[in-house]
Image (cartoon, coloured by chain):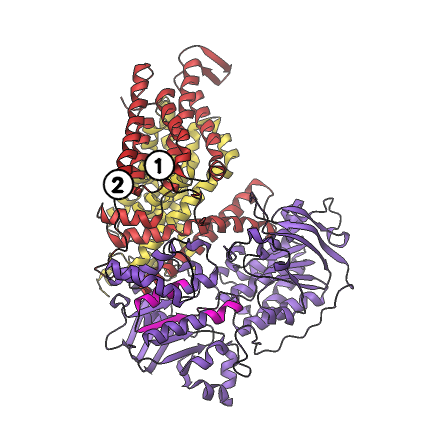
């Protein structure tokens, strides 16, 4: 049975800040209610959820006012709450599926027989048809999220707290995860509080929407009322949520962003010069025994957008890295044509030294944090052009221009690693675009991004395309690929089925 | 949340980022982060040992001079001490780094566990001597130095036993200097740089002022 | 199903794989003692030979094991080199290039160091590679009575090792993509430290999230129970006896052959 949640003048202030991250906030959530929390980036949505789950670290700040779950302050050790976070990689606790599901029940002190008997049921409820000793490292992102949910299902919690549970998984799996969440909620008739940018995914399944503003509650009410309230639409767009269009037909992938930046301007095939060509290409990790994808033939032209699509485990990321000259071809060849090669004597980008590669082929990795090299946003943007030998004046102009496009002027001196997820993502793309490479290769650029960041990214890519750069995007996000006018290359069609592991490590590689 | 007075009673002139946490009791996040730090440092050690082969060869012309970079091997203790600030963090982290190194494949095998214990103890003793109350550049530097000194003595017994005494002394002096610079002062500035990224917001060491 | 999280995948379940993790660690320590106490070719050679011959019993993917361990002989050679020119210069002069003086005794010491380094490293790596962290947690808590919160936190974090290894490879590629890979030694070193920094930041963030996820599932509450009992069987005794015999043989053989050369004393 669910527990009610009450907040009275509750606020939380991070140690180094003067203004509270959340609140002061007054809130009444009744037992068994399902609540969707919205708010712009930095409005304290995650902090509120962590507070509700009772996992805000003691030493990170100060709380004022009162926050009650049932009739006591939140404490996860009571065992009444279950928490699922955004990053699938950081939530797996043990290396075997069965042990991972058992973790919560063991903490609750359930007898071994009860634990053993509940594991298969919880796995089945979440649609995970796996042996108990299946390695968790071999699961896809969506499966990892469902595994975390299975662990919570087994605990039959009174309160379920979800912090963007579908943000880091592909849109096709998002609906499955949502249904899993709902089945856990129904099974325990638990109170559910969720933060999610993909509002459309949840609107038909929540009782109430809460909109957080900079100073506490901005609005709350049933989803229909909130979304039909014209006076709120400005604030909702500001939240960067994916506005629902119509109703049931939209199950994740079909959503379009609030800002209609999607003006496809790139020319179709056959106009620009061919820059990069793959012939009979097979790709694989270094020292792997077999390729993950083979038989890829591809010509990338100037000003053209190419979307690399395919199921999890089809080798999309590996293909992107190989095209970018970062991994050697497993078989076949990647060649830079004359227009891209310039005076370099090698035709294979993999044979180019780093200094030659960067100004020609840019690569944006899945995890933006991995490619930051400096301690300031402006320095990050100037690095590429400087290495490419631009003059100081040219570099400064470029940096000012990009900061303006990113809307990061005030953060020019901030540490790149201290930015929010969306800011990091936009910076990582802009830093690769800075030296104006002729080919830009990106890996799942829209993963986990809100609608505002999404629109900003589309703008960056469309601009690069207009200037004659080619963009090769690995993406599950068809709305994004449509927005940049990408033709599709389906790796599923090439994939060597024997080696396509069940999405193993598709993310994070 | 249990409250003691350590942070409030400290002189108000001390920067917030040098103060001890509110409590000496370990939280889950302290254990997990100590472990992950140990794992990351152990991994880096292993990678360095591989990619610095050329450098090592240069030192092999006169092996005691390897002490000049050997101070790096005690990095985990001072780093964890400065970041986690709980009693035992330096020791635990250095031990974990040693275990990771051994498991990934160090040519020292299980003996690195012993080295890890000795080096971790060296760093830990310094933080303990200051009662885990203050965490500053110089305390961390001292931790790096003592850890390196402990390392030098144990290495001379375990691995350099065949060396002449003079060489052993040169090795120890080199190691202590490099421990002070790389693992002491280096660890402190690494910690401050990490704090600036906001990654330490759950820790007392993450304060920016 | 092969576990991509393992550094060396276990491909077959053997009696040794099914042994208690504490047994495996005990074996590694016993074998270590066999090679550690003395610097001579014989005691280290016995331990090394046993470890290599016993490799199939570990159920590890042999090709993967070799890929993982290729660098060990290189490291051992370096250690041997150091000994060859630093050891007491007794016996006949073999090589004499000014400061570079090697004698028959220093070369013998170098050979002993080479074999010993391998004998110290290999048993531990292969035995630990067969341990599932969860089984180890069970054993450490149920038999050694180590504090639960510490053991589980540390072992849950250890799962991130595989992730960090692959992240390290990504970081190397990212540096190349940004144009800062290669170049002068100074630049290489700078970009290497940059990567170490990113690795630390990313892993601390991961740790914080993991701790939250664990606490979010009631971790830290008293009265934790265990899904499995960690147990010992006959095979565990047999395994320990085996390693004791090897250790004894190693030490005994060195004494009998008159090459025993203790590190202390």
- Name the residue tied to disc 2: C233
Q: Chain of mark 2?
A: C
| Residue A445 found in image quarter | bottom right
Q: Circle 1: is it few (<14), some (14-19), or many (20+) Cα within 10 Å?
A: many
Viewer-side residue, B176 vs A253: A253
- Residue B73 drawn above or below residue B204: above
Q: Chain in purple? A: A
Residue drawn at x 28%, y 55% is: C227
Q: Is residue B72 magenta?
A: no
- Name the residue tied to disc 1: B112
| Residue B115 found in image quarter | top left
Give the percent coordinates (x, y) of residue B129. Answer: 24, 46
User: What residue span does the magenta drawing correspond to?
Assistant: A147-176
Q: Do marks 2 and 1 share a subunit?
A: no
- Residue A501 drawn above or below residue C232: below
Q: Colour of chain B?
A: yellow
Q: Chain in red? A: C
Give the percent coordinates (x, y) of residue A268. Answer: 74, 67
Q: Chain of mark 1?
A: B
The quadrant in which the N terminus of chain A is found is: bottom left
Judged by depth in the image, the label closer to the viewer, 2 or 1, is: 2
| Residue B20 found in image quarter | bottom left
Residue A301 seen anywhere in this rendered image of the structure: yes
Q: Is residue A96 left or right of residue B10?
A: right
């Amino acid at each position: 049975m669910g527990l009610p949640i009450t907040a009275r003048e509750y606020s939380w202030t991070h140690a180094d800040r003067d203004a509270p991250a959340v609140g002061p906030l007054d809130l009444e959530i009744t037992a068994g209610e399902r609540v969707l929390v919205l708010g712009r980036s930095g409005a304290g949505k995650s902090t509120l959820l962590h507070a509700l789950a009772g996992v805000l670290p003691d030493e990170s700040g100060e709380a004022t006012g009162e926050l009650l779950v049932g009739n006591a302050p939140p404490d996860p050790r009571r065992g009444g709450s279950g928490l699922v976070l955004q990053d699938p990689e950081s939530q797996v606790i043990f290396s075997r599926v069965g042990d991972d599901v058992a973790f919560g029940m063991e903490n609750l002190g359930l007898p071994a027989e009860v634990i053993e008997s509940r594991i298969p049921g919880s796995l089945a409820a979440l649609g995970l048809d796996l042996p108990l000793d299946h390695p968790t490292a071999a699961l896809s992102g969506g499966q990892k999220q469902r595994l975390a949910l299975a662990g919570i299902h087994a605990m039959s919690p009174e309160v379920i707290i979800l912090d963007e549970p579908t943000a880091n998984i592909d849109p096709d799996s998002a609906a499955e995860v949502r249904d899993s969440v709902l089945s856990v909620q129904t099974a325990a008739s638990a109170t559910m509080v969720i933060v999610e940018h993909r509002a459309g995914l949840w609107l038909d399944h929540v009782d109430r929407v809460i909109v957080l503003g900079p100073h506490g509650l901005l609005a709350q009410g049933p989803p229909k009322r909130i979304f039909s309230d014209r006076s709120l639409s400005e604030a909702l767009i500001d939240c960067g949520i994916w506005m629902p269009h119509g109703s049931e037909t939209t199950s994740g992938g079909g959503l379009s962003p609030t800002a209609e930046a999607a003006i496809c301007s790139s020319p179709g095939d056959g106009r620009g010069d061919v820059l990069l060509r793959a012939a009979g290409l097979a790709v694989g990790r270094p020292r792997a025994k077999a390729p993950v994808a083979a038989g890829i033939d591809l010509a990338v032209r100037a000003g053209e957008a190419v979307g690399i699509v395919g199921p999890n485990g089809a080798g999309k990321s590996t293909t992107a890295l190989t095209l970018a000259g970062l991994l050697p071809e497993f078989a076949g060849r990647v060649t830079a044509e004359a227009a891209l090669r310039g005076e370099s004597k090698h035709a294979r980008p993999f044979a180019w030294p780093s200094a030659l590669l960067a100004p020609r082929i840019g690569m944006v990795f899945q995890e933006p944090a991995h490619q930051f090299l400096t301690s300031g946003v402006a320095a990050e943007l100037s690095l590429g052009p400087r290495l490419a030998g631009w003059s100081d004046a040219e570099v400064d102009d470029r940096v000012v221009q990009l900061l303006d496009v990113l809307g990061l002027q005030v953060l020019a001196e901030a540490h790149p690693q201290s930015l929010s997820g969306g800011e990091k993502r936009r910076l990582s793309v802009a830093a690769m675009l800075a030296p104006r490479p002729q080919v830009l290769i990106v890996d799942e650029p829209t993963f986990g991004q809100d609608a505002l960041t999404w629109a900003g990214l589309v703008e960056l890519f469309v601009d690069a395309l207009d200037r004659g750069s080619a963009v090769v995007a690995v993406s599950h996000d068809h709305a994004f690929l449509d927005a940049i006018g990408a033709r599709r290359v389906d790796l599923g069609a090439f994939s060597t089925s024997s080696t396509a592991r069940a999405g193993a490590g598709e993310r994070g590689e | 949340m249990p409250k003691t007075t350590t942070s409030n009673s400290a002189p108000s002139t001390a920067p917030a980022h040098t103060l001890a946490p509110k409590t000496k009791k370990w939280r889950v996040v302290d254990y997990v982060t100590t472990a992950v730090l140990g794992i990351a440092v152990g991994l880096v050690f292993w990678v360095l040992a591989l990619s610095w082969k050329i450098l090592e060869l240069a030192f092999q012309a006169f092996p005691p001079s390897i002490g000049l970079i050997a101070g790096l091997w005690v990095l985990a203790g001072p780093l964890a001490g400065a970041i986690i600030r709980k009693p035992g963090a330096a020791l635990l982290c250095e031990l974990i780094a040693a275990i990771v190194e051994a498991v990934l494949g160090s040519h020292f095998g299980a003996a690195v566990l012993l080295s890890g214990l000795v080096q971790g103890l060296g760093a830990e003793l310094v933080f303990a001597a200051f009662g885990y109350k203050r965490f500053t550049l110089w305390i961390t530097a001292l931790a790096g130095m003592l850890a390196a000194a402990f390392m030098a003595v144990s290495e001379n017994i375990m691995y350099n036993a065949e060396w002449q005494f003079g060489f052993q002394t040169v090795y120890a002096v080199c190691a202590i200097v490099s421990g002070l610079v790389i693992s002491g002062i280096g660890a402190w500035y690494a910690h401050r740089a990490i704090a600036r990224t906001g990654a330490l917001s759950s820790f007392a060491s993450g304060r920016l002022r | 199903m092969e576990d991509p999280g393992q550094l060396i995948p276990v491909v077959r379940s053997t009696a040794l794989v099914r042994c208690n993790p504490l047994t495996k660690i005990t074996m590694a320590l016993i074998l270590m003692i066999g090679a550690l106490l003395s610097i001579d070719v014989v005691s280290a050679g016995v331990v090394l030979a046993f470890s290599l011959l016993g490799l199939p019993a570990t159920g590890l993917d042999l090709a993967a094991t070799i890929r993982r361990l290729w660098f060990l002989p290189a490291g051992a050679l370096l250690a041997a080199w150091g000994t060859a020119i630093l050891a007491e210069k007794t016996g006949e002069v073999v090589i004499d290039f000014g400061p570079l003086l090697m004698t028959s005794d220093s070369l013998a010491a170098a050979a002993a160091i080479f074999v010993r380094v391998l004998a110290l490293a290999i048993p531990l790596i292969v035995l630990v590679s067969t341990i599932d962290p969860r089984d180890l947690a069970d054993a450490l808590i149920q038999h050694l009575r180590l504090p639960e919160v510490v053991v589980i936190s540390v072992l849950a974090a250890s799962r991130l090792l595989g992730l960090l290894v692959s992240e390290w490879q990504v970081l190397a590629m990212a540096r190349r993509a940004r144009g800062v890979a290669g170049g002068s030694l100074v630049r290489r070193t700078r970009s290497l430290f940059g990567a170490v920094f990113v690795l630390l930041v990313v892993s601390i963030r991961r740790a914080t999230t993991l701790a939250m996820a664990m606490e979010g599932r009631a971790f830290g509450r008293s009265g934790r129970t265990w899904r499995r009992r960690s147990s010992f069987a006959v095979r565990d005794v047999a395994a320990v006896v085996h390693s004791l015999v090897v250790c004894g043989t190693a030490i005994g053989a060195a004494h009998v052959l008159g090459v025993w050369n203790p590190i202390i004393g």
